[in-house]
């Protein structure tokens, strides 16, 4: 299969909560196997936009959308979309590590089991591979049966990444994945994201501008629901073209 | 944080202007020492160079501190990187002023070859370039840095003219070669000073536009 340049194409896309427009007419392409960071002040719509990429917003009854989100050329908001399959292909990792209250092994094996993998040897292999890719294998291989909740914060977050990886996703969405972690765990996660980027497309929402600068290839700046500026991370952080972006990055906002 | 950072950036700007002022004075005095055959003034210039060096180091340290502690971005980042480069250029100009002062002292020991025409003209243009380059750094984006860059050609032309005139004199009378060579050196120092002023103007354009224009044809537009 020829890899398309852009895995997501967001087209004239708006998101509404009742009469509040959270995301306003956004047009944005997400490049395959790159890290795209979305930054902006609280309430700018960045998390809402992120969650729309695997239809997590469906869970909010008052939420509706207009426009299109093309995933590999197909609109995910089409009525025929298999949302469960979409969320397998587009995984998500949240701000607060949220392992299931079960063993490390079960956390990772859960997804594959649900989609019908039964053979123990096959599951073992999936779990090991996912934990290796998440950089957690060495630390947990002797305690696979211990509770996922017994791990440290950084380990729990990597467990959540492993849980997502076990599903063989093409994209993983990260919603401030390190905001609850110390600097060393943060650095581990950042290294991991850059490693994963070779095989998985990453979209990350972060309040930490330095984090966006350190790890992303592209940066999108949002304000009041609008996409203000999008470009190479180098350009955005050294020479942004929009005055609002400039003011936000230099802390002279409002 | 922002208010403090703004104060720090302003303080940095003022330090650079102070350095610029010291360097301008050094250039002016070194040429004055030459033209007026005032070796005492030469010694002054040489003696004061360590103040320029100390300020250069201080500015660099301050820039590194601001990068580490304030993690500047966008225009702030360009401002600080520009400050670091400008400082290096200014410090080098100070060294050339010392070189001029040294040659002046040597020439003052000898009889005057002929009155100075090209060198004071070059010094005047070079100083105006330094002043305007720094003004444009302070006042922000304008035509000024582009004009500074253009003025460099005048200094280059005068360097060539000065050399050709001295070459003619040297051919006529080889005895004057030691003195004439020193004069060509001085012109060369001034030509280098103008080059450093050009570097500053180019960095100011980077600060404003985010584009490095060094080693390129000068764009006509602002």
Image: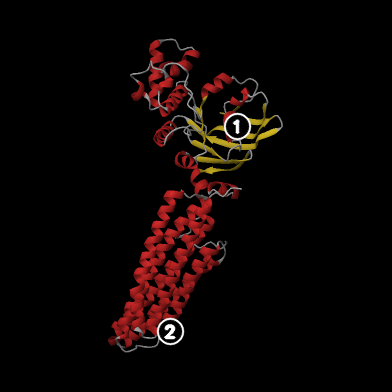
B114 in relation to A92, above or below: below
The x and y percentages for residue B150 are: 50, 69
Q: Is residue A22 left or right of residue A183?
A: right
SS class of the residue under badge 1?
Answer: helix
The x and y percentages for residue B91 are: 38, 66
Question: Which image quadrant for residue B55?
Answer: bottom left
Q: Are there few (<14), some (14-19), or many (20+) residues within 10 Å of tag 2?
A: few
Judging depth in this view, the residue of B90 and A6 nearest the camera is B90
The x and y percentages for residue A110 are: 47, 16
A4 in relation to B70, above or below: above
Give me the chain letter of mark 1. A
Question: Which image quadrant for residue A68?
Answer: top right
Give me the chain letter of mark 2. B
The residue at the point 43 percent across, 51 percent down is B67
Q: Which mark is residue A48?
A: 1
Judging depth in this view, the residue of B98 and A122 nearest the camera is B98
Judging depth in this view, the residue of A228 and A17 nearest the camera is A17
Q: Which mark is residue B23?
A: none
The x and y percentages for residue A108 are: 44, 19
Query: Is there CB contact under 8 Å for labels 1 and 2?
Result: no
How many labels were placed on the picture? 2
Q: Are there few (<14), some (14-19), or many (20+) residues within 10 Å of tag 1?
A: many
Question: Which image quadrant for residue A49?
Answer: top right
SS class of the residue under badge 2?
Answer: loop
Residue at image mark 2? B117
The answer to whether one can see residue B206 in this image is: no
The answer to whether one can see residue A160 in this image is: yes
The residue at the point 45 percent across, 56 percent down is B81
């Amino acid at each position: 299969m020829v890899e398309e340049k852009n895995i997501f194409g967001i087209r004239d896309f708006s998101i509404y909560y009742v009469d509040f427009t959270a995301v306003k007419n956004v047009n944005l392409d997400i490049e395959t196997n790159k890290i795209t960071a979305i930054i902006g002040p609280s309430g700018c719509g960045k998390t809402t936009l992120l969650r729309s990429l695997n239809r997590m917003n469906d869970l909010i009854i008052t939420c509706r959308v207009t426009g299109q989100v093309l995933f590999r050329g197909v609109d995910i908001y089409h009525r025929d979309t298999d949302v469960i399959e979409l969320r397998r292909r587009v995984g998500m990792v949240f701000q607060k590590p949220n392992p299931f209250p079960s063993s490390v092994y079960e956390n990772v094996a859960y997804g594959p089991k649900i989609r019908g993998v039964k053979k123990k040897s096959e599951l073992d292999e999936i779990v090991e591979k996912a934990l290796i890719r998440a950089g957690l294998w060495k630390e947990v291989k002797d305690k696979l049966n211990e509770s996922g909740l017994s791990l440290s914060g950084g380990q729990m977050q990597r467990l959540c990444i492993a849980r997502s990886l076990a599903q063989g996703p093409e994209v993983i969405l990260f919603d401030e994945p390190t905001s609850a972690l110390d600097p060393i765990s943060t650095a581990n996660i950042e290294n991991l994201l850059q490693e994963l980027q070779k095989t998985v497309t990453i979209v990350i929402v972060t309040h930490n501008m330095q984090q966006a600068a350190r790890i992303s290839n592209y940066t999108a700046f949002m304000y009041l629901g609008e996409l203000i500026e999008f470009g190479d991370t180098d350009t955005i952080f050294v020479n942004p073209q929009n005055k609002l972006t400039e003011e936000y990055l230099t802390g002279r906002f409002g | 944080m922002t208010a403090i950072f703004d104060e720090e950036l302003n303080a940095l700007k003022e330090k650079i202007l102070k350095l610029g002022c010291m360097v301008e004075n050094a250039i002016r005095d070194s040429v004055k020492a030459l033209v007026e055959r005032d070796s005492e003034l030469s010694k002054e210039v040489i003696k004061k160079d360590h103040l320029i060096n100390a300020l250069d180091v201080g500015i660099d340290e301050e820039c590194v501190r601001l990068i580490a502690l304030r993690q500047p971005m966008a225009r702030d980042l360009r401002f600080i990187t520009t400050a670091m480069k400008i400082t290096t250029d200014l410090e080098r100009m100070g060294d050339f002023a010392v070189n001029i002062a040294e040659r002046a002292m040597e020439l003052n020991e000898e009889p005057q070859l002929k009155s100075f025409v090209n060198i004071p003209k070059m010094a005047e243009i070079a100083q105006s370039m330094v002043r305007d380059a720094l003004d444009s750094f302070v006042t922000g984006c304008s035509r000024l840095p582009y004009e500074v860059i253009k003025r460099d050609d005048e200094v280059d032309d005068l360097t060539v003219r000065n050399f050709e005139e001295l070459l003619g004199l040297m051919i006529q009378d080889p005895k004057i070669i030691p003195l004439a060579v020193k004069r060509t050196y001085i012109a060369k120092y001034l030509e280098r000073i103008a080059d450093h002023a050009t570097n500053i103007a180019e960095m100011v354009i980077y600060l404003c536009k985010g584009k490095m224009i060094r080693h390129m044809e000068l764009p006509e537009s602002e």
